[in-house]
Image (cartoon, rainbow, N blue to C red):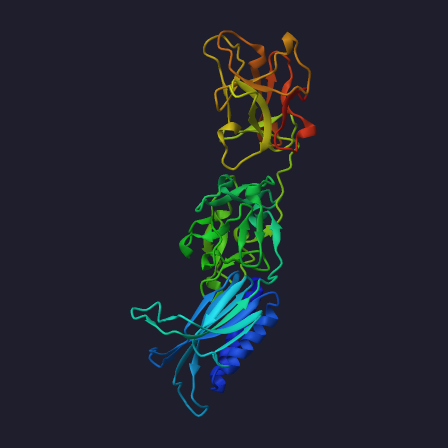
Amino acid sequence: MSSLISSAFDMIKAERAAADINKLDNAAFTQNTATNLSAEFPGFNVMVFKTVGTDLFDSEFFVNEHTADMKGVLLDTTYKLKHFLDKDQKDPSGYDIFQIWVFQGDSTFRNRGDGGFMNWAFTGNDSDTVKEKPWTCRANTSRPYECDGDVRTLHFPARSGYATTTGNLTPDSSSPGYHACLDVTGNGTANGTPVQMWECNGGASQKWTYNGYKLQAANGKCLDLEGNNNTNGTKLQIWDCEEIPGQRWHMSPSGSLRHMTDQDDRSKDICMNDLNGQTANGSTVAAWACGSADNRDTPSQNWAWGGTPPTTSGNRAIWVVNSDKTYGNTEYNRCMVRGPGFDSSKTGGLVTQHVCQSTAPSSHQWAAELPSSFDSKGYYWIKAGNGMCLTVPYNNGTPPSAGTQLFWWGCETRWFSGSQMWNIIPTKVGTKGAYMFINNWTGLCLSMDPATASASGGKVTQDTCPK
């Protein structure tokens, strides 16, 4: 899409150059630009509108009073053309300022000024009416005044626009494997929530939809350049989707997501950047100068649809303990969770699993702790965020079998209770440190139920330990 945007600007600049050379009344620029943009963007509406005429000193002598409520704006730009009264003039008499929109949303445009052939051209409208209406001229100046009269109203229906793409986005800097994805921190929904890099997990916080100019998260918010600030390192965040420049992003052929700052020099574009090519969980994603027309040699700025969860030679009875106190299963890449309580007393409940979150809630957090009230003989409690202990069900005193779902339950502090005591055995998955947790009573390992491994709320169980 970025190459299409660039070609549109090249086409507009060529029309402007032709108008300057021909020294005509700029009608050809108005009409040709609308026609060519419509052909270039068949799924969009187009409006080319002369807003102001000035003298050589940029003093306004003509203002085309209008209101524009454009939605789904792909392109919104302004061009200044020389104005000649006849072809024999050496120097222009003044300048004409044109505003150009390419848009796909349901939109309304009202004009009280001169709607002549040289002053505007448009495509895609489904209604065109003229009615006498109240109007405030020079509304945005220090001297507004009432100037009621005929107002021409154009309505533009929503159009198909650019075909949407939905999925995960991963940078070239995460190759090989492409296991790091663009992520909404904590799957948050508040305006200002930053985006970051996180291990691809297929969760909602990593689902994005792109329509050719906006990147929308699964929660309905849009990728936003904070304050439309073009400074390197500016935070990228999610915000309510609005018709503002800071939410317009164009994807180049190489995959860079570019925010335009200068229509005449695309090398000044700002790109979505995985800072320093870091792809570890929580790494910063921010705005950074693209530095070239396409930037295909910068892996931290080139993004692709896809991204896959890390593949390991893991085992469902082997777990990693993360810095955020989550316990991740090495075979299924899901986290152990303190699940629903048995009743309202909250004295106990089921242990389940869920997709690991970029910001772990307390229900996902666990910690190994040596009891202080008795000799645990080197065995540990595994305590949930609410202080309850990972427990093998009592089962009337008979050790339950492999596949039994585990509980969280109040820790027995008076004596050694084997159903809550775990031997922690360090191991590895590839080169990554990991652990087996072996229950003292049953001799079985902390594990996951294969039948419910892909479902949120699936069972965390005990099972035969790997050899």
Please give the name of the residue rendered at 52% of the width and 30% of the height, measured from the top-left corner.
322
Residue 283, compared with residue 41, is above or below; it is above
Where is the N terminus found, in terms of image quarters?
Answer: bottom right
x, y percent for residue 452: 67, 29
Q: Residue furthest left?
A: 142
Q: Is residue 148 left or right of residue 297?
A: left
Asked whether 120 or 294 is in front, the reply is 120
Residue 330, compared with residue 394, is above or below; it is below
Asked whether 424 or 349 is in front, the reply is 349
Q: Is residue 448 left or right of residue 291?
A: right
Q: How many marks?
A: 0
x, y percent for residue 422: 57, 16
Q: Is residue 241 visible?
A: yes
x, y percent for residue 67: 44, 68
Asked whether 210 or 5 is in front, the reply is 210
Asked whether 231 or 193 is in front, the reply is 193
Please give the name of the residue rendered at 69% of the width and 28% of the height, measured from the top-left corner.
450
Q: Is residue 187 left or right of residue 253?
A: left
Q: Residue furthest right?
A: 451
Please give the name of the residue rendered at 66% of the width and 28% of the height, measured from the top-left corner.
315
Where is the C terminus found, in terms of image quarters?
Answer: top right
x, y percent for residue 359: 49, 36
Q: Is residue 229 visible?
A: no
Q: Residue furthest bottom?
A: 88
Residue 372, compared with residue 40, is above or below; it is above
Quadrant assignment, res 432 = top right
Residue 307, compared with residue 49, is above or below; it is above
